[in-house]
Image (cartoon, rainbow, N blue to C red):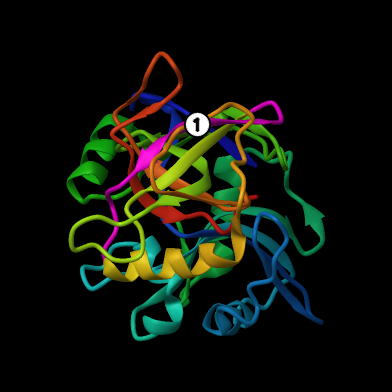
């Protein structure tokens, strides 16, 4: 189930509010014979996060769980950059925060109200070092959101307490409220580095209008040296001689790439001509097509 984006936090006793975990969304299927752990697009996480698999083995009932795999940084907060580079951050705590229960002992729970599903989920998980129940508050969305901003978290999730689970659908009964505006955009190229910077200067961004790519601006900030190096390396096999845009786009010193990678940027607003104002690179979204 997916969430629609909402601009403002709100208070409502018919809604519950959770932390918006900054990691990889993951479904876990548990049975007496095997365990499956996979991403939204069906890629297996079994080999990537064996600690999560070991934690799931401690749950003795068959179930289907929905949650987020995160790495907690030195301050104890979820850090997407650390989980993307988990091989080099294996000393940090790895957690699977579970926020929904879709099936229990072969009984589907999609049509059970969310607060009931979460009651069953909390009992199911119990005490577990790696698998954690994603708790919530009821009614007080504004205060909860303000705390998430103070803690520099990505935002919060607002969910109707009696909502059913609609697999694969995006509904108004689940809302994501972010602490800043973000967009998922396609990488269409990169520019030459300037000054003392290495690898590249900015990423050329695109959005899809139907099946046509439209230029959405360039993101030249949000990188440290390791990000510049890693992104540059990933883009090298995708280089191409021609622009992926049908319209003529003049960008000095550009290297075009096959538009196959998605990244997330934060920005201040969309301009009238559908360009991102002040885009700042946040991360690659390898979990999205």
Whether 14 is among the magenta residues is no
Q: Is residue 249 above or below residue 199?
A: above
For this rendering, which residue is in front, 266 or 23?
266
Residue at x-position 65% and y-position 50%: 289
Q: Position of residue 183 (x, y in %)?
A: 45, 37
x, y percent for residue 192: 35, 54
Image side of residue 8 versus residue 25, left or right:
left
Q: Quadrant of residue 212?
A: top right
In the rendered image, residue 145, in percent from the top left (x then y), is placed at: 28, 37
Q: Which residues are magenta?
A: 209-224
Q: Quadrant of the N terminus?
A: top right
Quarter holding residue 34: bottom right
The answer to whether residue 224 is visible is yes
Residue extending furthest toward the top: 272
Q: Position of residue 118 (x, y in %)?
A: 55, 50
- Res. 137 in view: no
x 27%, y 30%: residue: 142
Tag 1's secondary structure? loop
Q: Quadrant of residue 195?
A: bottom left
Q: Callout 1 environment at 10 Å: few (<14), some (14 to 19), or many (20+)?
A: few
Label total for image: 1
- In magenta stretch: residue 216: yes
In front here: 254 or 280? 254
Asked if 289 appears above or below 165 in the picture, the reply is below
Rendered residue at 62%/76% (across/down): 59
- Left-right relation of 8 to 212: left
Is 287 in front, or is 129? Answer: 287
Disc 1: which residue: 249
Relative side of 119 to 134, left or right: right
- Residue name at image x 44 percent, y 51 percent: 190
């Amino acid at each position: 189930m997916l969430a629609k984006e909402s601009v403002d936090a709100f208070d409502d006793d018919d809604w519950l509010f959770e932390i918006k975990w900054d990691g990889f969304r993951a479904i876990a299927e548990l049975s007496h014979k095997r365990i499956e752990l996979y991403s939204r697009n069906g890629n297996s996480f079994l080999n990537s996060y064996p600690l999560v698999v070991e934690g799931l083995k401690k749950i003795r009932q068959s179930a289907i769980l929905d949650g987020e795999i995160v790495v907690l940084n030195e301050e104890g907060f979820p850090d997407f950059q650390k989980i993307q580079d988990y091989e080099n951050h294996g000393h940090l705590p790895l957690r699977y925060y579970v926020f929904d229960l879709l099936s229990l002992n072969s009984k589907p729970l999609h049509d059970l109200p969310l607060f009931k599903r979460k009651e069953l989920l909390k009992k199911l998980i119990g005490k577990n070092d790696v698998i954690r129940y994603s708790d919530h508050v009821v009614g007080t969305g504004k205060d909860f959101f303000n705390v998430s901003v103070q803690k520099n978290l990505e935002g919060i999730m607002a969910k109707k307490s009696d909502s059913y689970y609609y697999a694969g659908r995006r509904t108004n009964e689940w809302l994501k409220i972010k602490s800043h505006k973000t967009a998922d955009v396609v990488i269409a190229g990169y520019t030459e580095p300037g000054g003392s910077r290495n690898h590249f200067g900015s990423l050329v961004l695109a959005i899809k209008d139907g099946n046509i790519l439209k230029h959405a601006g360039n993101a030249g900030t949000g990188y440290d040296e390791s990000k510049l190096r890693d992104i540059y390396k990933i883009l090298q096999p995708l280089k191409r001689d021609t622009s992926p845009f049908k319209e003529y786009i003049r960008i000095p010193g550009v290297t075009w790439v096959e538009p196959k990678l998605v990244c997330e940027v934060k920005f201040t607003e969309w301009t009238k001509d559908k360009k991102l104002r002040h885009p700042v690179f946040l991360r690659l979204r390898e979990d999205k097509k």
